[in-house]
Image: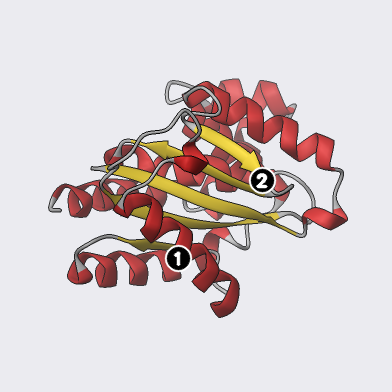
Amino acid sequence: MIAVITGDIINSQHAETEVWITKLKNLLEHWGSAPSTWEIYRGDEFQFKCKIDEVFWRFLAIKSLIKSQENLDVRIAIGIGEENFSSEKITESNGTAYVHSGRLLNDLKNDGHTVSIKTSNDSVDRDLNILLKWSSKDFDSWTVANAEIIHEMIMNKDITQEDLAKKFAISQSSVSQRLKRANYELIVETNQYFRKKISEL
């Protein structure tokens, strides 16, 4: 099984494309090569595949990166399933993971939520989607400052609060406050729970 993330940028028409698209490309390139592992298409939509136990952390890395840009957000549909056909271009690959993710993004555009997951297990879907609905209320309200801190923590697991304070030219107590406001410890626990539920598939 694999995980496929299909997403689109919210409010992309109100932002400088070059800024967010360059950062998103750099992030996706960090995880794999285009166009077999990821692709950006139709201007502000993208698709990316990864291991199932990495998908929550990858989703948060993308979310925090985009939320680090003023007035931008991202919709993300997570599909878990098989990859029956692997093409040189991810957008031409096929399997249940791709079908789940693609259809789910259309549903998200209609229901107003910013993240959802679809697997072949209705019980797991129900549990994880309730979790995502609650947690995304928090993620959706991140300030640019909070999103920047969270993104650094996700991308650099060994980074210290002292490192972050130097990077953002703020005090260590300010770093600590931002992490608390963003509920970072709860995010780490949520990732552990997410991985446990996914492993049951």
Residue 30 percent across, percent down from the top left: 53, 22
Q: Residues within 10 Å of mark 2 (few under 14, many from 20)?
A: many
Residue 176 visible to the viewer: no
Can you say whether 69 is above or below 140 in the image? above
Q: Which residue is more in the foreground, 185 or 49?
A: 49
- Which mark is on residue 66? 2
Number of labelled discs? 2
Indicate the quadrant containing the N terminus: top left, top right, bottom left or bottom right: top left
Q: CA distance from mark 1 to mark 2?
A: 20 Å
Q: Please report whichever mark, 1 or 2, sits nearer to the chain's N-terminal start.
A: 2
Residue 120 percent across, percent down from the top left: 22, 62
Can you say whether 115 is above or below 5 in the image? below
Q: Kindly indicate whether the residue at mark 2 contacts the one at mark 1 (C-beta within 8 angstroms).
A: no
Q: Residue at x 45, y 65 (%)?
A: 104
**In the image, is 73 to the left or to the right of 125?**
right
Classify mark 1: helix, strand or loop: helix
Q: Amino acid at mark 2?
A: Ile
**In the image, is 201 to the left or to the right of 137?**
left
Q: Residue at x 27, y 60 (%)?
A: 119
Q: Residue at x 58, y 77 (%)?
A: 110
- Which mark is on residue 113? none
Can you say whether 9 is above or below 148 in the image? below
Classify mark 2: helix, strand or loop: helix
Q: Which residue is more in the foreground, 181 or 69?
A: 69
